[in-house]
Amino acid sequence: MSVPEFIRGNIAPVFTAFKENGALDDDGQRNLLDFLLDTGHISAHFVRSGLGQMYTFSYEDVQQIAQTACRHMAGKAPVLMGCSGVWDRNRDSGKRPDPRTYLEQGIELSKFAEDMGASGVVHTIPEAILPTEGQTVEAVFVRYFESVCAAVSIPVLIYQPPGTDPAYKVTPRLLARLADMPGLAAIKVSNGDAYYLFRLIRATREKDFAFIVGVETAYYAALYAGCRAVIGQGAAINPQVMTAVQERFEKGDREGALAAQDSVNLLVEQCSSPAAFLKRYATEKGHPVGSYARKMTDNPYIANPDPITDDAYITFKRILEIELAKYA
């Protein structure tokens, strides 16, 4: 399976629209997708992303948002659907899901997303599954992704989120092996270590496989090493600037690409509540989205997203619009 054309440039991590009671807001979700689509600088939309609070989803939530997003974006733009099984990422003893159930859910949700019209499915690295006696973590990876890839005919993408247990971080050797697996198209790695990224990208340089950088402050460096795409808050909030980094880099405009990367970095540094900001900004621009987030309790590994104050919103909006004007 060749890497699809839409795995290039900005892949937006779609924030999730919630109602005040924490339920999914289908109307708000459609409005937010329309807002992202209107930017004209997004190649694909990653639904049930990390920034979309993927670890708060129930099985039924995944089906609901897949149906909402895929039906709404049909014929408009590709949807990449997060289809890992249900887990809140609590690694405490006894808090991980049953391994068989987790894999079965991932396969079932992937088939459902394909039926709904998703262009690809995204699975986090199988951090939820502990190796059995005598089994290696690498063997867990291989078995998991072989099972998922065998179940669907659309591309499968791997996602290594921030804060991954070091024992589960993909190595260059493992990634080279996974890249040869039929059906696996790409990996997103949310890590800003340039040396680590370089080694992963170079490990797959001769393969029909795409690397997606998941920390946009490392975008320029990752492009230089050979990455094809980026998924980060800026791919949703300021995709015009992200496009400038890649297009200027590809044209050999080193200084222009670096200037755009400076803008990208500034916007990351100045926005502490990306989901809350974008929901309010989309609403202001005529695409109403509730500002609510879904709360989590009793989980030592995940912090609840911060709300945004009026002062913080106004301040960042001013900074954002100044930077966007440079790339209009």
Image (spheres, rainbow, N blue to C red):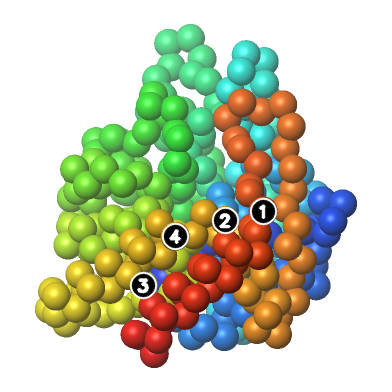
Using the image as rendered, state which of residue 235 and residue 153 is in the foreground.
235
- Quadrant in which residue 138 is drawn: top left
Which mark sits nearer the N-terminus, 4 or 1?
A: 4
Foreground tag (3 vs 1): 1
Task: Residue at 77% x, 66% y: name it.
Answer: 290
Return the x and y of residue 107 as percentages of the image width and height: 63, 45
Circle 2 crowding by C-alpha within 10 Å: few under 14, some 14–19, many from 20: some
Which mark sits nearer the N-terminus, 2 or 1?
A: 2
The quadrant of the image that shows the N terminus is bottom left
The dot on residue 273 is 2
Give the CA separation, mark 3 to mark 1.
25 Å
Using the image as rendered, state which of residue 301 and residue 80 is in the foreground.
301
The quadrant of the image that shows the C terminus is bottom left
Q: Which amino acid does label 4 sit on?
A: Gln
Q: Which amino acid does label 2 sit on?
A: Ser
> As drawn, which residue projects farthest toward the right?
21
